[in-house]
Image (cartoon, rainbow, N blue to C red):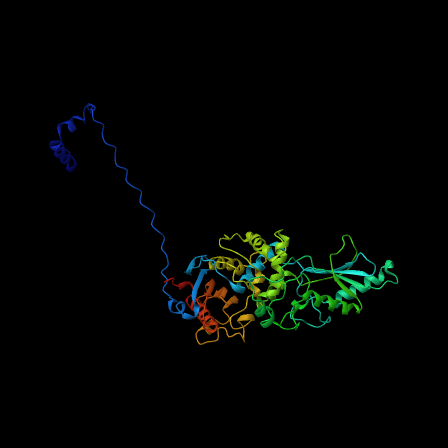
Amino acid sequence: MLGAVSFGVGAATAPAHALAGMTTTATPSSTPSAKPTVRPTPSPIASASKIRTCSVADYASASGFGTLEAQVRNASTGEVLYDRNGSNPAPTASVLKILTAAAAFSVLGSDYRVSTTVVKGSQPGQIVLIGGGDVTLSRLSSGEQSFYTDAPHLDTLAAQVKQAWDADPSNAGQPITSLVVDTSLFGGPEWQPSWDENEERVVEGSTPYMTALMVDGDRDDPTAVESPRSTDPVGRAANAFVDDLGGGISISSGTAPSGTTQLGQVQSQPVSALVEEALTYSDNTIMEELARLVAIKTGAGNTFSAINAGTRKGLETYGIPETGLYFADGSGLSADNKVPASYLTQFMIKVLNREGSLGAIYDGLPIAGQTGTLGPGYGRFDDSFSSIAVGHVNAKTGWINTSRTLSGVIHAQDGTNLTFAIYALNYSSDYYALSAIDDLTAAFYKCGNNLSNN
């Protein structure tokens, strides 16, 4: 009944043409009707994002930084939690070593060993010592331990040569009288022009002339982490080898003849072991060796100028955009090297996940307050605040006159794994730069996934 009433009311008040339209066909209008307006589709609602409240602003503003550049990522999600000029390419100092190592893994392989070989020369009584680039080869007697763990020894090589020489009937009655040294694998110059030679080679004793043949990294003291290096690494190695052969042998330089008989060979530890030791103690010499071998293997060349192309080629396999990367050397000693912090935080996720052979890099990273260049005696993570991160940070240190750096993995207090890179650029005090870096790292550790970018 209500429906009928409603219809009746509607019929009584509707215009006549509307009522007519209910029973007859309406006459078409000469004016086309307007198209209905299309209602816009609402935009999807943005997903909720976590509001992070743990600020490190006080630590990041420390004057010890000089200029701070830094980035932190959540290693599980890849999310950038904190960024201060993280995309700006800057000198990494020795943090660069982790990238040299990664290039070596992709180009040479983790099991690759560097060989030092002796072959028969082209003249009677002549042998040729061919430098293969192994900087760990030791002049100490077999059984003695040099700085480089389980390094090959020259006296082992000399014993092989003497035995092979005596066993060859064509040498009957002919002693070894001359040694030719072939160092043609590495091209010159032997010193990177941007390095401070007096500081690095003599005073600090961290870096030798880079030649394809040397012993004990050309250290004066074969057992020391750092020791002054000579002006003639090839001569030092050749003289030591002649002594092991029994002396009375002339020495000259040259190249090995093709197709000649091999008399002996010794090999380094595999690249994986070399990398782990070099990262733990920030050894420049091994990393310069590996960078040069990578450049040679990729076809880039055999000089310092070839390292950039060789290393970048080696890093391609990891799939991280290489924008801004430049490699002047393999050790990070040059201020001309350039790597953004954002590249390192992405790369360290792969290291933490042990992709390919990168687990060896993680294993070689110093641990805050415990090992290597972050261990006792280096003054790191030892104040009342930064000590909270002891044992929870695996990271590579870096130091040149313009940059103090640290990059690696933080196992944060809340259980989150963070990857990070911190650069203190153009700092005024080494002590205060280190303190500022350690405190900021500890603040990242304390904040974990609640780290605020404000």
Q: Nearer the viewer, residue 125 or 81?
A: 125
Left/right of residue 174 with respect to residue 406 in the rendered view: right
Q: Is residue 149 visible?
A: no
Q: Nearer the viewer, residue 325 or 42?
A: 325
Q: Nearer the viewer, residue 27 or 75?
A: 75
Left/right of residue 129 with respect to residue 389 in the rendered view: right
Q: Is residue 386 visible?
A: yes
Image height check: is 140 above or below 418?
A: below
Left/right of residue 426 with respect to residue 277 in the rendered view: left
List x then y, in percent, for residue 48. Answer: 36, 55
Quarter of the figure with the C terminus: bottom left
Q: Quadrant of residue 370?
A: bottom right
Q: Residue at x 63, y 57 (%)?
A: 293
List x then y, in percent, for residue 56. Answer: 39, 67
Image height check: is 71 above or below 19?
A: below
- Most extreme residue toward the right, as rendered? 173
- Most extreme residue toward the left, as rendered? 12
How many numbered badges does the structure rendering display?
Answer: 0
Quarter of the figure with the N terminus: top left
List x then y, in percent, for residue 108. Answer: 63, 55
Q: Quadrant of residue 67?
A: bottom left
List x then y, in percent, for residue 94. Answer: 54, 64
